[in-house]
Amino acid sequence: MYKTLFLCCFINIIALISVNAQENYSLSKDTTQNISRDTTNTGQKNFTYNINSLKVEKGEIKIDGELNEPAWSKCVTAENFVEIEPGDNLKPEVDTKAWVTHDEDNLYVAVVCYDKDMSKLRASMADRDKIFNDDFIDILLDTYNDNKQAYEFVVNPYGIQGDLLWTSNNEDSSPDYIWSAETKVYKDRWTAEFAIPFKSIRFPDKNELSFGMHIIRTWPRSSRYQFSWAPISRDNPSFMGQAGHITGIKNIKRGKNLEILPYVLGSVSGYLQDPNNPSSKFVADSLLKGEAGVNLKYGITSNMTSELTYNPDFSQVESDATQIDVNSSSVIFYPEKRPFFLEGSNIFNMDINTVYTRMLNNPMFAGKLTGKLGKFEIGYIINYDENTPFILPHDYGSVARTTSLKSLSNVLRIKHDMGGESFMGLIATDREVKNSYNRVLGFDGSINFLQNYYINWQLMGYYTKELNDTSIFKSSLKTDGHDISFNGEKFSGYGGYISFLRRSRHWNFNIGLWQMPPGTRKDVGYTSAVNWREINTWQGYTIYPKSGFILNIQPQLNAWLTYQFDGSIRERVVQPNVFIQFKKMMNLSSGFLLVNDEDYRGILHKGIHRGWINFNINTSSFIRGGGYFEAGKSIVRFDNPSYLGNIFTGELWLTLNPMDQLQLESNYSYSELSKDGGEKLYAGYILRNKLTFQFSRNIYLRVIGEYDSFGKRFSIDPLFSYKWNPFTIFYIGSTHTINDFGDKGNDDPRFIESSRQFFAKFQYLFRL
């Protein structure tokens, strides 16, 4: 196995030299052919994808979706869109045209989307960011022209907005921006009009600006078609590097704005004194509890923003979906949903998860600074926490504890732009709890060369002095040299990774070396397990059939070999996979653990063969869904000693849209584990349903219901929300947990409410 992986590395290095030379020639030839063919069809053989933005006077553009202002007729037309998905820079079936202009306050974009059958238009009256299965227009702005990130402004035919932050190989729908858009639907087309305030985006402090810009139309019909103003080569991994440009943006108002966001919250709660005893007393609040707080945000310059929050309400409007973790030895990772930590969070994202902001749990106050200074991107967070959580990793997993201890955390991140997609960066984190500390230092980077190749790395140092109080946490779990109890130990470690990647139209791969030492502790990050070294590779080759029902097919191979620091084998895996994209917006992926041997707590389990299949269907606007199934051998981790059992897991998801305003989302997860003889060790499911009725763009009613058969409890969460913009919000709702105590054969009720809360919140954004 060890020799095979190194042989694979050697073959990649030899092969890429010849393939790169061959594909560079092919790329040049293919690109010329595509552009020549497309521009011949559109009648603009030498068209360049640049627009000089003509400045208009304030008030000349009215955002109503009608596009009847005289100012639009003076602007240059962006046309000759090309089909980039599923076609490869082909002439589209339908036409799209766009115009761009600006005044001192806003950037304006107008788009006309022609159609040959408007009855097939997909549009839903939904909440913000819930429109990505519809027809929509997407405006991407790379305001720094660095090809590393872009703001995305999306609108569907009903004028429902979506906003994202694009970074290399990722789109994050968490950020929200203040901007406006209106649309109109006609017999043969629909139109959209955007106004993007300059004070809502960051950009260089220059007299005249040029933005990279993609204008992309999504047209879901027999396939999910996408049309782009600028052609995009699949053999060029730099998406924003192929964008068009808006030039001539000058004499504008800078984004040095002050935002004040106060909130008030009222709630009444109750709970069963003993949640395991249905006869125990239910204790309810006799008075309404109130809280208030404020968030301040100031644009120091047009490219640097500071933010301060006092007594923030970091409760979540929508609870995390329960996950099955009966046989898991590691802490479950949940995504961040709190707006304060989401904005600008992309700078803290790293392959080794060094900043996991859900470890900043319940702040009394927090501050943040994000932005750019020249070629340096800077991010800083300070957080004073009133209920400090811990993730404590060991050799075979991790455990979580939340405490009432107070802590002070600091995070500093700096990235230096080296041009294109290349960068180098530093990370430093520190958390102080009483007389203990955890400090992490890191150096990372990415070098892009020969267009398609990357070398990525992250080198880390970890330094920890534990709390000395085993009454808070005590455990027999150990890693090399120390245990994970709070007994005042002091330890450190040095780790990281380096990887070699190729991204291209056909052949893609990743070869990496990783190390996670026993002394790893990231108190503001996430760690699943420690004390391992690994060499791994992923290989994929994409084939594009010229005809038929399959759009593309990608055979893949995953393989890794993991050792503990004492040289013993932790895990060895060879896993062939395949991904198939079909027409009709359907896909299928499947894989099999051909080789899977793993040491768990001193026992080496061999032959843990297991297969899986995943599918998604989005053919109809009325119904879409998918599923995941996995079956085979699995380690029974909760027994000591561990042994092999038989596992089956399944998940089905379904979304129904019986009308434009109504949506039902349903998710069913099932898992069972049994011994070889058939005796079930556990079997259970989680069913979660979410029903949403959208009265208008701003108002919706939502009810979430969930049943967890493992915990034997229901939860019901109704919510009414009025959202004037992403930040000015009023909502009122409640949460209810109902325990299933089973049929006791007497008159005692089976289902008893164990906790409930009624709440209302109002917050208002003052933008000065």
Image (cartoon, rainbow, N blue to C red):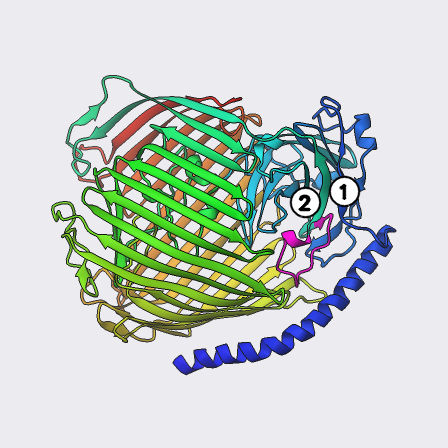
User: Extreme top residue here?
Assistant: 287
Instruction: Give the image quarter of residue 408.
Output: top left
Q: Position of residue 238 (x, y in %)?
A: 62, 57
Residue 121, position as x, y percentages in the image: 69, 40
Q: Please report whichever mark, 1 or 2, sits nearer to the chain's N-terminal start.
A: 1
Q: Residue at x 45, y 79 (%)?
A: 6
Report whether 276 appears left or right of 269: left
Q: Secondary structure at mark 2?
A: strand
Which residue is found at the position 37% from the left and 67% from the top? 632
Q: Between residues 697 and 102, which one lies in front from this camera angle? A: 102
Question: Which quadrant would the N terminus be assigned to in this image?
Answer: bottom left
Q: Residue at x 38, y 63 (%)?
A: 496
Q: Quadrant of residue 540?
A: bottom right
| Residue 658 magenta | no
Q: Which mark is residue 51?
A: 1
Amino acid type, mark 2: Met
The reply to whether the C-beta atoms of the residues labelled 1 and 2 are less than 8 Å apart is yes
Q: Main secondary structure of the magenta part?
A: loop
The image shows residue 451 at horizontal and vertical percentages of 63, 64
Q: Residues within 10 Å of mark 2 (few under 14, many from 20)?
A: many
User: For residue 553, which quarter of the picture?
Assistant: bottom right
Is residue 173 at all visible to an observer of this figure?
A: no
Dot 1 amino acid type: Ile
Q: Specify the label residue 213 is tagged with.
A: 2
670 lies left or right of 635: right
Report the magenta residues as a range.
227-242
Q: Determine the CA span between mark 1 and mark 2.
A: 10 Å
Q: Nearer the viewer, residue 324 or 262?
A: 262
